[in-house]
Structure formats: structure tokens, C-alpha cells
Amino acid sequence: MPSQAKILVVDDERLIRWTLVQALGELGHEVSEAADGAAALAQVAAEAPDLVILDIRLPGLGGLEVLQALRREHPETSVVMISAHGTLETAVEAMKLGAADYIRKPFQAADVQHTVSRLLTSQRAERERDLVLGREARSYGLESLVGVSDSMQQVRGLIAQLSAAGASTVLVEGESGTGKGLVARLLHYTGPRGRKPFVEVSCTALAEGLVESELFGHERGAFTDAKARKQGLLELADGGTVFLDEIGDMPLAAQAKLLRAMEDRLFKRVGGVRDIRVDVQVVAATHRDLGQAVAEGRFRKDLYYRLAVVRIALPPLTAHREDIPLLAEAFIRHYNRELGRSLTGVSPAALSLLGAYRWPGNVRELRNVIERAVLLGTHPELQPEDLPAGIAQPTAHEPHASGLSSLPPSGLSMQEVERGLILRALQAEGGNQTHAARRLGISRDTLRYRMKKFGLGAEAG
Ligand SMILES: Nc1ncnc2c1ncn2[C@@H]1O[C@H](COP(=O)(O)OP(=O)(O)OP(=O)(O)O)[C@@H](O)[C@H]1O
Ligand SMILES: [Mg+2]
């Protein structure tokens, strides 16, 4: 049962007021009374009750007028109408004007108690949901995507543009830990759908045979285990966003159905005949090269084109190393709060180690490293010894590519050194340009540009 609420009872008949006060008092609520519309409005303004029980027929200001004024001025207060015999049409009109429910005269105390308890429970659930959503929405401002690099600024700019335009399909690409999930949430929470559901679907985790029933729902008896009808995730996301994580892992049959659902905004439940209409924003993420998956026949070309209209590409962390200090600071603040610590920042020595590491797990790995350091650190500033061995002693695991301990007396050509480094990185990464670029701490485009400049073709690996 919901906890105590404030309720105002409005009726011109004393006996009815008395009955209601008794019935609701029994439930532990705090009940006050008003005998006409004007008094009711004044009391609502003064007492801000959770719920008003309002007679439709009142002397002076009528019940429906009071209802309208309440909906306009105190929308957070629910109103239950009381209607006498033969005023059912008026009751229906009251519902249209925003009454939460109505009770017919003559009534039993138990009816009133039941109606009120039900409304208060759903009111409370809704308020809690608002609170959670509000809190979530607040913690997902654009500034939570940290970084001053061009790439991070561009991503924030794109999200702002897309949210304003209410774009309905976005493909987010990037290696593991680069922030795809964060970007998907920002697209939802900073946009016009932010107060509607955000439904996350991990396409990897869905069992092959169940993908369709998960996404689209199923009718009772659609297959052996379908004991009852079930709504799919697309239906649950109606009005909001469905986030299809690792879409590259979605089976081909489900891809076909998804494409149709996206184009027509219609689909059928598994085993169903009726078309279901939904309005959802689709954000898909992938760490794979979907173009490649298309070439290999593992991903539908038409779905790929449909998804790829708007793309957000997240770079590996080593392609925006300049953001490492800011990210580290942001994570320190976060974990200070969460773990009750008070680190002041990162020492220059530790920062230079963070800046030199190759971060195969990208921002997520940095976040984990900082969490551990905040937990274990014993100095006001984060020190090299608070970092895991692989980062703290880079030379032991990651021989410095140049291997130069001193300058040869004859001098050397920077260009030759650079060319040599690029070749070695490519060799070490088996010719994979993305990985070689990461190893060198430059973007893939920069790598390609320099390969061309030094006459290193694709055969360089
Ligand atoms: N630019 C950023 N600013 C602040 N936090 C970030 C940034 N990028 C990523 N993060 C944080 O790093 C962690 C990993 O990001 P996220 O889970 O979004 O990555 P992902 O690309 O979805 O990874 P995966 O492919 O493994 O699912 C999250 O805690 C996220 O909030
Ligand atoms: Mg993710």
C-alpha cells in the first residue's frame, strides 16, 4: 500500500464528505475537506494535496470547471470525480478533461479505498520514474563526453545537431571502449525523446533463435515455449530509442525484418497477423567494419545503407591522446565521489606514462586504470606507482620503437627515422593500418598520408 498521502475531498453534502474522510482516514491518509469549488481551489493552492476527490455537481463553480483549473494550475495533483446516477456522459467528459478516474454514487467505502490506493501507487511510480529519468538525463549532458580534441568536439557537435533535428537512425562506429554506448545514451537523453524509454539490446547476447521474438515480440503459442503473448523490445521502446549494440552480430533473418520495421515503422509479432506500429529512434553500434561484413555476405547491404545515413565514428584513444589529461581528471572526480577519496590530480610523471601507453581498451581501460589508482593510491596526486605494471614500466613490455639510446655522431635524417618507425609498426601489426597507427599514436589518415609520402604502399606490411 502506498504510504500516507494528502487528499482533499470536495462535496457540498456533509454526509458524503464525512464518509470519504472516514474511508480514507482508515488508510492512514491525511484528509481535508472543502464544500465548494472556490474553497477547493484555494485549499489546493495552500496544501498541494496529492489527490483531490471532486463532486461533479457543485453549487457555484461547477465540478468540471474546477477540474480544468486544477489540471491547468496543479497538473501534478490527480483528480478523481464523483458522479451521481445518470451523469455518466459528464463523467466521460471529465476523463477527457484529465480526471484520473471517477467513482459513481452511491459508492461503498471499499470502492473508494481501492480506487485511491491504485491511483496513489501509480502516481508514486510515475514520480519515481520522473526522478530517475530526470537524474539520468541530467547526468547525460553533452559535457559528459569529455575531450577538447577536434574529434571529440566534432562528435559533441554532431550529437547536438542530430538531437535538434530529431534524427531517427544513427550508426556509431568505434573500437571497444571508445564510448559508443555513451554516445547512444547522449543521442537519446539530450534529444526530444529523452523522457521516453531507452531500450538497449545486445545483439551478441541474443540467442540465435530468439532474436526475432526478443525484438518483435511473439503471440501466444507462436512456438513451443511461447506460453503467453510477449511484447518485443521495439514495442517497449515506443516513442523512445532502441540501442542495437553490436549490430554486426545480428543474424541475417532478423536483419531483414528489422529493415522492414525501420522503413515502414510496422512489424508483426512472431506468430502474429496484426501489424504493430511503433515510432522509435534507432541507434546502432558496431566495433566491426560493417562494409567488410557486407562484402563477406554476413550483413545485409540494404540494412547497412539504411543505417549508415548518419554515422558517428569514434577514434581509438591513441588518436586523441591530447584528451588523456582531461579524461583522467574527470574519472578522478567521479571515483573520488564514488569511493569517498580526495585525490587532487595526476602527477606529471604519471601523466606522461598515461600519455605514452597504447590503450588497447581505449577510454574504458583508462577509466579502469584510474578507478584502481583512486582506490589504491596513497598520495594526494596519482603517482606512477599507482599504475599497473604494463603502464608504469613501458620499456619492459613495449620496447620503445626507435630503440635509439643516443644520437649517432654522423647525425640522422628524421624522415628516415619516421619511415623506419612506420615500417616497423606495420610489420609488428601484421600490416593492419589501424593497429599500426594506434601503436604510433597517430590517426589512420595520418598514417596513410605518411605512407604515401614515404612511398610505402599497401605491401609495406
Ligand atoms: N569521451 C569520453 N568522455 C567521458 N567518458 C567516456 C568517453 N568515452 C568513453 N567514456 C567512458 O568509457 C567507458 C566505455 O565507454 P562505452 O561503454 O561507451 O564504450 P563502447 O564503445 O560502447 O565499448 P564496447 O564496444 O566495449 O561496448 C564508459 O564508462 C564511458 O562512459
Ligand atoms: Mg558498449
Image (cartoon, helix red, strand yellow):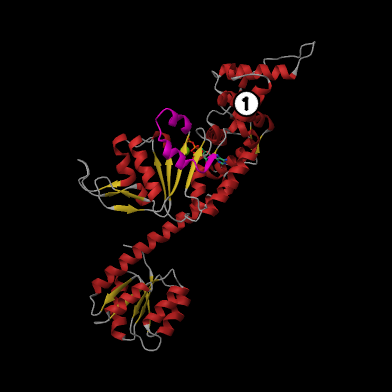
| Residue 72 within the magenta-colored segment of the rendering | no
Q: Is residue 237 visible?
A: yes
- What is the x, y in percent for residue 193? 47, 55
| Residue 292 within the magenta-colored segment of the rendering | yes
Disc 1 marks which amino acid?
Answer: Arg
User: In which image quadrant can residue 426 be found?
Assistant: top right
Image quadrant in which the N terminus is located:
bottom left
- What is the x, y in percent for residue 209? 29, 36
Q: Residue furthest bottom?
A: 60
Image quadrant in which the C terminus is located:
top right
Q: Taking 364 as reference, is 89 left or right?
A: left
Residue sitting at 32 percent across and 46 percent down? Answer: 216
Q: Is residue 60 above or below residue 186?
A: below
Residue holding disc 1: 448
> What is the secondary structure assignment of the residue under circle 1?
helix
Numbered range of the magenta stretch: 289-312
Q: Taking 236 as reference, is 130 left or right?
A: right
